[in-house]
Image: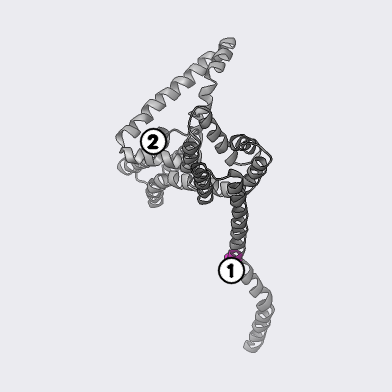
Amino acid sequence: MYIYIIIISVFATVFSFIMFLIMPKIFDKKGKDLSKLNDYIMLAKKGEEKKAGSRKSLAEILLKMFSFTSRMLPKNLVESVKTRLELAGIQEKMRIDVFLAIKFFMPFIFLFMLVFFMLFFEIPAFARLFLVIMIPFTYIFPDFYLKNKTAKRQDEIRRHLPNALDLLTISVEAGLGFDQALIKVANNIKGCLGPEFKRVIKEMEIGVSRKEALSNLSKRTDVTVLNTFIFSIIQADIFGISVGKVLRVQAAEMRVKRRQLAEEKGMKAPVKLVFPTILFLFPALMVVVLGPAAIRIWDTLKLLMK
């Protein structure tokens, strides 16, 4: 009986994490942009039309179920989650309803399993401990996932921003306007900074002012060096300062900050290497150095005992 309970608990855990990772792809908004094209393809393939309809109906049912979560929770919490999804760069892949449902339903699933097994089965102590640990862990894991994604995204923006500013400076000094230079940078820069610049360009094309579009970029990224650059560009527009000079100064400052950051990481490296050295290298070194002496002492003691 115990083995069945353990199998069910492990299956529920694996299923929950797989759902957390796959759910964003099910409700990917980018797939909705191609819905009309998919409809034409499905009409040409009548055999797959029923499967597509069943998948769509299942997604709609799940979305309706998940929408109740955001309605029941406070608005400030929902807005906070929305902001964190934007900072992590996955607001277009994961709906707020889906994230909140996963975060608040998974602990209740394990709580229900714990109560159910304790009431109707005699489960061992380690199984109860496992379910008890999974209740807070499944509640904390989505926040940890968002925090990790946000940190990686911000670090990627910091690494690619100096190169982007160099290219932007060269383009402006070559005679391009700021908007055209920004388009060139967005098409050539790597990482998540390029799509963010493209979004700024799209916002300006639909009528949003440059100041507001750059301010939205600052809110979506929350990177200090990028915020400094955006503030400088906005101030240059307000006071009529040459954008080329501002870009040249900002590019130089970014290169200096990148060098300082590399030096800071280099200074931290010896400190970080102390603990792996003590844990892995030092014991092996002690065995090599003191091993022969210990063997000789042991042989001497055996001779004396005889």
Taking the image as shown, residue 181 lies to the left or right of residue 129, namely right
Residue 24, position as x, y percentages in the image: 49, 33
Label disc, if present, on residue 101 of the rendered structure: 2
In front here: 203 or 232? 232
- In the displayed structure, 157 sits above or below 46; it is below
The type of residue carrying mark 1 is Val
Q: Measure the alpha-carbon separation of dots 2 and 1.
A: 43 Å
Q: Residues within 10 Å of mark 2 (few under 14, many from 20)?
A: some
Mark 1, residue position: 274
The residue positioned 49% from the left and 33% from the top of the image is 92
Q: Which residues are magenta?
A: 267-274
In front here: 264 or 43? 264
- Can residue 109 be seen in the rendering of this structure? no
Main SS class of the magenta portion in the image: helix
Taking the image as shown, residue 252 lies to the left or right of residue 100, namely right
Q: Is 269 one of the magenta-colored residues?
A: yes
Residue 12, position as x, y percentages in the image: 44, 39
Q: What is the quadrant of residue 272 in the picture?
A: bottom right
Q: Is 239 one of the magenta-colored residues?
A: no
The residue positioned 51% from the left and 41% from the top of the image is 237
Q: Secondary structure at mark 2?
A: helix
Residue 156, position as x, y percentages in the image: 58, 47
